Image (tube, rainbow, N blue to C red):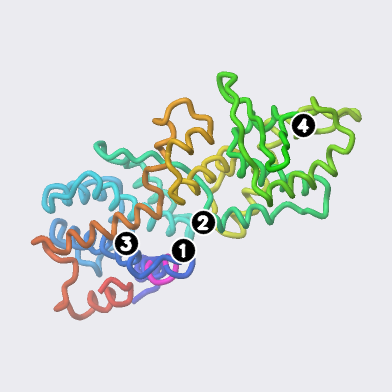
Amino acid sequence: MKKNEMYFYQLLRDFLTGYLIKRRNFSDKTVRSYRQTLNLLRNYFREEKGISFDKMDFSCFSRSSIYDFLMWLKDARNSSTQTLNLRLSAIKSFLKYCSEEDMELMPVYLDVSSIHAFKGFKKPYVEYLTQEQLKLLFSLPDITTRLGRRDRFFLIFAYETGARMQELLNLQISCIIRSDVSVKVRIHGKGNKIRYVPLLGITVKHLDSYLAEFHKESQPETFLFYTIHDSQHTQMKPGTVDYFMKKYGKLAYEADNSFPEGLHAHMLRHSIAMAMYKKGIPISYIRDFLGHSSIDTTTVYSYADEETITKALEAVDHEESTGKATTAKHKNWKGKEQYLLEYCGLS
């Protein structure tokens, strides 16, 4: 075979046997869920389009073809709306990987990405950082410099308090409330509502170090985060935060391309909320912590993230494997097609 004839299969193999396992550290069970989706897709092309697996390439991944595949799942396999969206998500993940490996495949990914989630399954998307990504982010500021120490404290403090960017920038020294047993932050939220957020021990240490360096002689009304203009302390502007967020986000993505692109301050707020939700903290508590006026706003964190999606895919695969529909695996196939199935890790 010529190299170009194998290109599609090489990327498919690398996605299933390399990327998902080594770079994303997915379990065997989760990888099987992705494999099941791709097996269903090749079955669709064989049964409905007359295209065997050894004839497939990226031209099969058009918006119309993938949409027709999803409709086939709906009609022929009686797949639910939720299942359709999960299958679509798996295909998009594969094509996104391919586009990152080869920019010439970006149009293919963008074409299929234009297929929106099907109605009937509410799936708000909350972009947040995992604990590993947070550790990476916090390690990036150069703490041998004054600005690096400031930036790192801002990142940590923004995460630990879950405050909105403007709430952080409005904080004054007087907003740090100390007692014999605790340290908390008084935050003026939307609608001039006030909430108090307690700080944990390690965060208090970071705070004390920051205050010792940046607020040696500050008055109570001095802004916690400031910039210096003409020897005067002035309230830090959102543009300053956006600048260093973009800088560290770019560095993080270069170090780990699973890191979300376009880092912004609100992502840290999402991250602490999602961490609390995954720890089993009641939604009502998270609502109060974030300062949401309605619990409906907070319930967005209870919807599917990538980890939840993969678990749902696994459940769907188990359910479908017990049905009467055509199985995705054909053990009697031989020759070139069987070789490719084994090569790609689909058999």
Q: Quick one: 80 or 181, which is closer to the camera?
A: 181
**For the residues carrying marks 1 and 4, which lies nearer the camera in this image?**
4
Q: Quick one: 327 or 6, which is closer to the camera?
A: 327
Distance from the alpha carbon under mark 3 to that under mark 4: 51 Å
Q: Amino acid at mark 1?
A: Arg
Q: Which of the marked residues, 3 or 2, is nearer the chain's N terminus?
A: 3
Q: Which residue is mark 3?
A: 34
Question: Quick one: SS at disc 1?
Answer: loop
Provide residue 111's location: percent of width, then percent of height. Answer: 36, 45
At label 1, counting other C-alpha atoms closer than 10 Å, the crowd grade (few under 14, some 14-19, many 20 or more) is few
Distance from the alpha carbon under mark 1 to that under mark 4: 42 Å
Give the number of the disc on residue 258: 2
Q: Which of the marked residues, 4 or 2, is nearer the chain's N terminus?
A: 4
Question: Quick one: SS at disc 3?
Answer: helix
Q: Is residue 95 left or right of residue 133?
A: left
Tell me the quadrant of the picture where the N terminus can be found: bottom left
Identity of the residue drawn at 72% across and 38% down: 179
Provide residue 9's location: percent of width, then percent of height. Answer: 35, 69
**Position of 88 relative to 215 (above/below):** below
Identity of the residue drawn at 53% across and 36% down: 289
At label 3, counting other C-alpha atoms closer than 10 Å, the crowd grade (few under 14, some 14-19, many 20 or more) is many
Q: Is residue 18 magenta?
A: yes
Q: Which residue is mark 1?
A: 24
Q: Which residue is mark 4?
A: 173
**For the residues carrying marks 4 and 2, which lies nearer the camera in this image?**
4
Q: Which of the marked residues, 1 or 4, is nearer the chain's N terminus?
A: 1
Provide residue 37's location: percent of width, then percent of height. Answer: 27, 59
- The magenta-colored residue range is 16-20
